[in-house]
Amino acid sequence: MNKIITVENLYKSYGHTKAVNGIDFYVDEGSLFAFLGPNGAGKTTTINILSTLLTKDDGEVIINGIKIGENEDDIRKSIGIVFQEGVLDPLLSVKENLETRGSFYGLTKDVLAERVEAALLVTGIQNIASRKYGSLSGGQKRRADIARALINAPKILFLDEPTTGLDPQTRKRVWNTIIDLQKEQKMTVFLTTHYMEEADKADYVVIIDNGKIVAKGTPSFLKDNYSKDLLKIKPINSSILEKNLNSRNILFEKKIDIYQVKLENSLESIDIINMNKDNIESFQVLNGTMDDAFINITGKEIRE
Ligand code: ADP
C-alpha cells in the first residue's frame, strides 16, 4: 500500500516544552488513521506541522510524495483541514462560505459550483446551504466545517477532534459522514479523537504521550496486547465463590453482587467457570476495550 504520509524523527518545542519529541509513523493511502493521546500530548502540534500550519524544528515529513518545507503550496492543494473550532463566517450562508473558500484555490466558476454541490451532498447539508452558518446547530456546523475542507477535493482530510462536544446522536451522524468520505470517496482520513469507540473503527492507531509515541498498531493489536478480558460472575453463594477464588490466588473485584476477574486471555475463564459451575447463577466474558488499552498504555484517562 502507498504511504501517503511519512513522519520521521519529528521534533517541535515551544521554549522548554518539547511538544513533539522525536516521532516516527506513516499513514497508508485511503486508510482511517487515529492519532490519540491525553491532553497536551502533542497531537495538535503534529497535525499543524503535517498540514503546513506550523514549522517543524527537525525531522522529515512527506505528504503525498512532497517533503514539507519544499513545495507547501502543492501540499496544501492535496489536504483539507477541519479545526477544533469552526472557522466559517457566521454571517454568511453555508454556500457562501464554501464559495469564498473555493475562490482561494483559483477554480473556474463551473468547477467551483460543482465542488460546492459535491461538498454539500457528501456531508448531507444541501437542505441548509442557504442558512447562515451562525444560525446552525452544533452538528450542522461540524458538517459545514467538513464541507469547507472538501472544496479543494483533498486526498487527505485532517480532523482535529471532529466530534468533541456533540451530543451522541449528532456525533454519530458526523461520524458517518467521516466514514463515508473514507470508504466511498477513498479519502485518507487522519483524525484525533477522545472517543475510544471511534478509535476502535480506525485501520491504524498511533498513541502519543509527552511528545513521544507510546504505542501503535491496529485496534485489535492494541486491545490484545494492552487490555485484559474480563470475566463477570454472579454467584449463588458469594462466600463460597470468594473462598474458591482466594484458594487459587485469583484476584477479583466485587461490584455489588458481581465478581470481576481480569484475564490474560478469555480461555482462562473456562477453568474458573468449571471449578465454580455449581455456584454460578450467570456469567459473562467481555473482550478488552480500547478505553482499557488507552489507560494501560498512558496511565491516564483520555479526558483527564
Ligand atoms: P494536544 O493536542 O495533544 O492536546 P498540543 O500539541 O496542543 O497537545 O500541545 C503539546 C504541548 O505543547 C503542551 O504541553 C502544550 O501546552 C504545548 N503547547 C502547544 N501549543 C503551544 C504554544 N503555541 N506555545 C507554547 N506551548 C504550546
Image (cartoon, rainbow, N blue to C red):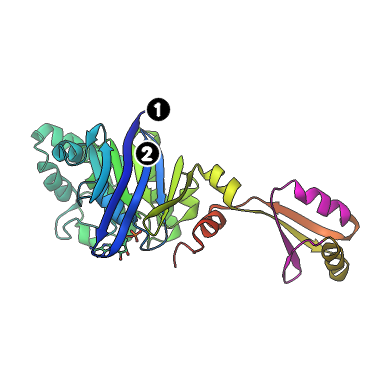
What amino acid type is highlighted by mark number 2? Tyr
- Is residue 270 visible in the rendered image? The answer is yes
Compared across the picture, whether 224 is left or right of 44 comes to right
Of helix, strand and loop, which one carries label 2?
strand
Q: Is mark 2 within 8 Å of ligand 1?
A: no
Foreground pick, 17 / 252: 17
Residue drawn where x is 75% and y is 46% of the image: 267
Of helix, strand and loop, which one carries label 1?
loop
Q: Is residue 272 magenta?
A: yes
| Quadrant field for ligand 1 | bottom left
- Residue 66: x and y, percent? 22, 34
Q: Nearer the viewer, mark 1 or mark 2?
A: 2
**Where is mark 1, residue-wise?**
1
Sort mark 1 into few (<14), some (14-19) or many (20+) by Cα contacts within 10 Å.
Answer: few
Compared across the picture, whether 183 is left or right of 10 comes to right
- Residue 209: x and y, percent? 41, 57
Residue drawn where x is 17% and y is 53% of the image: 93
Q: Is mark 1 within 8 Å of ligand 1?
A: no
Foreground pick, 293 / 108: 293
**Where is mark 2, residue-wise?**
26
**Magenta residues, start to end:** 249-276
Q: Is residue 178 magenta?
A: no
Compared across the picture, whether 60 is left or right of 25 comes to left
Q: Quadrant of the C terminus?
A: bottom left
What amino acid type is highlighted by mark number 1? Met
- Residue 282: x and y, percent? 80, 57
- Residue 169, located in which quarter of the rendered image? bottom left
Residue drawn where x is 76% and y is 69% of the image: 257
